[in-house]
Image (cartoon, rainbow, N blue to C red):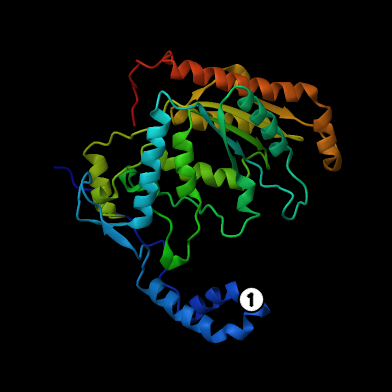
Amino acid sequence: MPKPPDVRTGQGPGQLTHAEFAARFRRRFFDPAFGSHEAAIEELLAVAWEAYRHSRKSPQTRPAGPGFADPGYELSIEWLGAKAAVDQARQRQGDPQGPSRVLLVCGAARNDKTCPGEMSKTFRMLQIARCVFADQSFEADVLDLSLLVSEYGKSIYPCKGCVSTAMPLCHWPCSCYPNHSLGQVSDCMNDIYPRWVAAHGIMIITPVYWYQAPTVLKAMIDRLVCADGGNPDPSSTHGKTVAEAKALELRGWAYPRHLAGRSYSIIVHGDAAGAETLRRSLCDWLDDMDLIRAGTASCIDRYIDYYGKYATSHDAFDADAALHGEIRNAALALCQHIRQRRAGTAPPDADLSEPRPK
């Protein structure tokens, strides 16, 4: 029997001192309005310090129950709730009598309720596509990622990279958050996962920021890694037990693709550079997860008022009738592809085996 791989450690630092923890905790109460509540803050600090010191990541758990590898293993009730929502969404998506559903993602970080003071052109493009879906009697679930920067208590925490340790350590849906001991709460991904699962098609409309995806979009992309090979049973690794996860992968792992078969459309826009690079990157990402491109017209990259003034870019978009038409065509292509898929049309490579499986 081969020797199990070593678990390499030594990078992460130790726990904070109480003084440093207290200083970070108190930053939440910088507003002088909290000044008269010092005694209450001190009491909360004591509770938070104990949670941190004892690593109470998931303070409320229950036994996993039937259907799990270890029915007696204590799982977070928050994770179990997320799994139940994903399971319900999968049933809705698989109902042949149910409506066709598109997840319409706004990838821009800008909106008019925070610092930029103006809505994004991305959101206006989304509204054009949304009208097409309504005309085609499709349900459109709008996921506006700009709300991560303009609403209280909304965030997407970074992916921790569990998959690079061993694929079964990456749980589906993600079990890394919330982490109450570190104050990493209000993570939106447990709300987002079921919306991806429930959809028959995905349309992502996004600007390019410095040749890359906006932070709000990239954060979601990274946290969707668990949808491509993730482990739906955290009890099989007893949480984040690295040695067990490595052993499970080495015994043979199926790398389940939890979003495979959904149709997709991508629209990327920019002002000077990078749109084509980002469009290709997004298409490659979705191709790798076994989603299916809805035809040539469904994925485009365009520039609005190339090297023009930012101050008048909305006016330039108003005048670009051809781009408006291309957005409508991308949405129509996605509708048509979803209809074909739901009618039973298989992709041409459906029966091929992978010569280079994971």
Q: Judging from the image, what secondary structure is the residue with disc 1 in?
A: loop
Within the image, what quadrant is residue 51 found in? bottom left
For the C terminus, give its image quadrant: top left
Within the image, what quadrant is residue 327 found in? top right
The residue positioned 24% from the left and 43% from the top of the image is: 248
Q: Is residue 7 above or below residue 101?
A: below
The residue positioned 68% from the left and 42% from the top of the image is: 209
Tell me the crowding category of disc 1: few under 14, some 14 to 19, or many 20 or more residues within 10 angstroms, Cα based: few
Q: Is residue 158 above or below residue 343?
A: below
Observer-nearest of 96 and 143: 96
Image coordinates for residue 288, horizontal then vertical, percent: 45, 30
The residue positioned 61% from the left and 20% from the top of the image is: 332
Left or right for 334, reference 248? right
Disc 1 marks a residue whose amino acid type is: Phe
Left or right for 101, reference 330? left
Q: Provide the residue designation for mark 1.
A: 30
Q: Is residue 101 above or below residue 239?
A: above
Question: How many numbered callouts?
Answer: 1
Query: Would you say residue 156 is visible in this rendering?
Result: yes
Observer-nearest of 346 and 128: 128
Image coordinates for residue 355, horizontal then vertical, percent: 33, 21
Q: Residue furthest left?
A: 1
Query: Would you say residue 305 is visible in this rendering?
Result: no
Image coordinates for residue 55, horizontal then vertical, percent: 36, 68
Image coordinates for residue 148, horizontal then vertical, percent: 60, 52
For the N terminus, give its image quadrant: top left
Observer-nearest of 40 and 28: 40
Left or right for 132, reference 112? left
The residue positioned 38% from the left and 17% from the top of the image is: 350
